[in-house]
Image (cartoon, grey):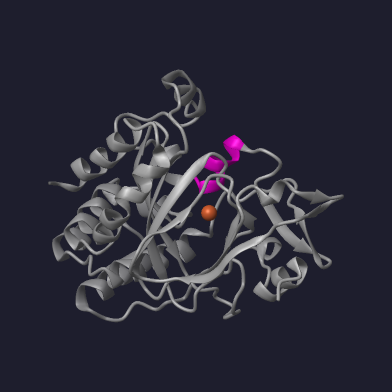
Amino acid sequence: MNSENILREIADELHNSRDRKEVHFKMHKRIEELSNNKKFLHESIQNCISNKKFFNQATNLFFYLLIEGDVIIAINIFPPNSNNLESITHDNIHHHGWRLLSTSVISGNGYETISFKKKSHENRDKERVLLEVEKNFKHIKGGTEFVDSEQAHVVFHPKSTSATLAIWSADHPIKTQKIKKIFKRFPLINSYLSKTARTMGLSDLFGLNSTKGNYFHPDNGKIVETKNYSKPHDGTVDEIVPCMFKFFEQVEFKDEKYFKHIEEKNSDKIKILCKNLIEGEPIKDLGIDGDVRRRFSKQQILDALNYK
Ligand SMILES: [Fe+2]
């Protein structure tokens, strides 16, 4: 089966079921297998980046493989922090509203993460958010992790680039009209994603279903809600594209004919990356600088949670 059919089959299975959570768990083995399936990964990546302007607009760490109805299937890159800061947040503590997520590590050594008890972000003592830790662990290769709807979590920059295959869906069937309304900002034609969808960050997609806040951070020894959260981009094109090439190297996506073609149409910086990839010259794992307003240490978070 080609990659597009595989992606459509997954979306159909989710859309056709009433018990979405059950379908996620049933798919876990398959998601793990797909995260190891080079043919599937190479085909999906190629479909995703075939737009000739892809690299000129790459400011987010996502390859959206399919956005259909309430289902999103993506490859998510987690680069190190370029300042070599350890156990620093990749993004604020957040939850995905009504979306369920199943994620499996494709490449690299995974990342440290903390997941909180579902809806515990709704419990408040004045401005303090009384999050309760459910699991403090490292998401590594092998197996598939599940993040429930309205389950807050936080991911820390790994020491070296890692990537995951991520499948999101609503936690319940959503009527077509409602889906149309939700996605009216992102015109979609079949699985061919609009420019908007290709370039947007997850916060754009998840900011749509906020209840009692989507984002949180430690502040003066307590966890508080992040007001006016904004994260239109993960980084500049110059930061993000090398992260993507590091990932291509990890999954051995280096088709000479394809990258020779890409080389011709892009900047000198991208030409060098293409050349290095084709010739097997190691791609530097430079990472991203991130945003100082979203840079919190794991210790700061654990202290604010009073976590022993
Ligand atoms: Fe998340």
Q: Position of residue 235 (x, y in %)?
A: 53, 60
**Is residue 147 rendered to the left or right of residue 265?**
right
Q: Residue 202 colored magenta?
A: yes
Q: Which residues are magenta?
A: 200-209
Q: Residue 298 colored magenta?
A: no
Quadrant of the image containing the C terminus: bottom right
Q: Position of residue 193 (x, y in %)?
A: 35, 37
**Residue farthest to the top?**
177
Q: Residue at x 64, y 58 (%)?
A: 92
**Residue farthest to the right?**
126
> Toward the viewer: 231 or 240?
231
Q: Residue at x 73, y 45 (%)?
A: 228
Regarding residue 268, the answer to whether it shows in the image is no
> Toward the viewer: 119 or 57?
119
**Is residue 256 rendered to the left or right of residue 29?**
left
Rendered position, 226 above or below 190: below
Q: Position of residue 26 (x, y in %)?
A: 31, 49
Q: Position of residue 141 (x, y in %)?
A: 35, 70
> Toward the viewer: 206 or 142?
142
Rendered position, 140 above or below 291: below
In which quadrant of the rendered view does residue 277 lie? bottom left
Q: Residue at x 16, y 66 (%)?
A: 256
In which quadrant of the rendered view does residue 87 lie? bottom right
| Type of secondary structure dominating the magenta stretch | helix
